[in-house]
Amino acid sequence: MEIPSRSQSDPSADPWPGRLAELGHPGARRIGAGVEGVVYALGDGRVAKVWTGRPPTELTRQVYTDIARHQPPFATPEILEVQEHEGVVVTYERELPGVPMRGDSAHEVFERELSARHRNGLLAVLRGLASVPGSDAMRRLTVQGDNRPLWQGHDRFPDALAALVSRAAARHGTSLAMHVADFEAGVERTLNALALLPDVPVTAIHGDLVPPNIHVDAAGRPVAVLDFGFYTTAGDPAFEAAVTAAIWDMYGPYAQEHTAELTQLFAQELGYAPATLTVYQAAYALTTYDLFGMGDNDGHFPWCAEQLRRNSVFTRANVS
């Protein structure tokens, strides 16, 4: 996920191409940056990822193996080697095919009309990830901003997510409450709605399917999904669909319309109850609102506040 106000270093002043050259990788060039770090193409089908966020662990590698074992219809990351240079973790990974589905809505304006290529591509990715069963390693992951495995002490995904909502609201909920009316009651309504969700078989959850994290071929077909880790877990595939509908276009002039359209599309095509998608969207906003700052200079915080103000579960409006 790219946040419009989050500091990105000037690529022209980036020391890492030179450092990678000293490590035996001449010609390394920066090709992308996200929540977890900055990625450099090395040639020979490999990339280096310089981690600025929390670094990967053996658990991360096991999750990648668990996903690849079930052969989703697109490539996923594979860590070949992990090194540490001057206190910074660098992973050497296989280069994934394709090009980003499109840029992030923080940096380019999305058209009002959602193309069939984009709709079909998103459905293909959601179906592909939903074909991968949730594994023990996925359950043992923590999500960004939290310090305990999401599933610790829980047997159902909605209950695990509700516990995360409670922990996240306790972190800085007073700040969010200044921007969202009836905040404490809204949190309670969200928790009650999560408790009523049915238990379903869990699958691999990416949790951050913004357009740059989906690579496509020349025909627009998804060929790779990358940048796992921000909210990766085992969970209800409806959660993945709900979050994807919300974050596909976060900051554009038609963002609200796109979220509504994609939520309806995923409900119809994938068989998810609209009310389930709505409660998951509230839970996502409540668990990520403070991850990049809590002021007007950060895009994600006001986005989460706006999501909650419009969410019919959180506000107790009628849900169809």
Image: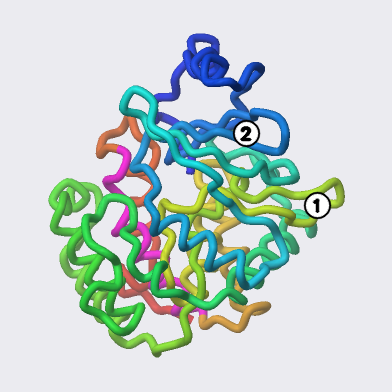
- For badge 2, the amino acid type reads Glu
**Alpha carbons under labels 1 and 2: distance apart:** 18 Å
Residue beneath the point at 49% across and 53% down? 228
Q: Residue at x 25, y 65 (%)?
A: 165
Which residue is the site of mark 1? 220
Position of residue 90 measured from the top left corner of the image (x, y, whole percent): 45, 34
| Residues at discs 1 and 2 in contact (Cβ within 8 Å) | no
Q: Nearer the viewer, residue 163 or 258?
A: 163
Is residue 166 among the parts visible in the rendering? yes
Q: Is residue 167 left or right of residue 227?
A: left
Give residue 263's position: percent from left, percent from top. Answer: 57, 68
Position of 182 relative to 255 (above/below): below
Tell me the crowding category of disc 2: few under 14, some 14 to 19, or many 20 or more residues within 10 angstroms, Cα based.
Answer: few
Q: Quadrant of residue 29?
A: top right
Residue 265 appears in the rendering: no
Considering the whole magenta stretch, tell me its main secondary structure: helix
Identify the image's colour scheme: rainbow, by chain, secondary structure or one colour.
rainbow
Rendered residue at 62%/55% (across/down): 76
Residue 114 versus residue 271 in the image, above or below: above
Front residue (pair 230, 239): 230
* Camera-nearest label, 1 or 2: 1
Q: Is residue 166 left or right of residue 142?
A: left
* Secondary structure under the numbered disc 1 in the rendered image: loop
Identified by mark 1, the residue type is Gly
Give the magenta-colored segment's residue range.
274-292
Occupied quadrant, residue 152: bottom left
List the residue tagged with mark 2: 108
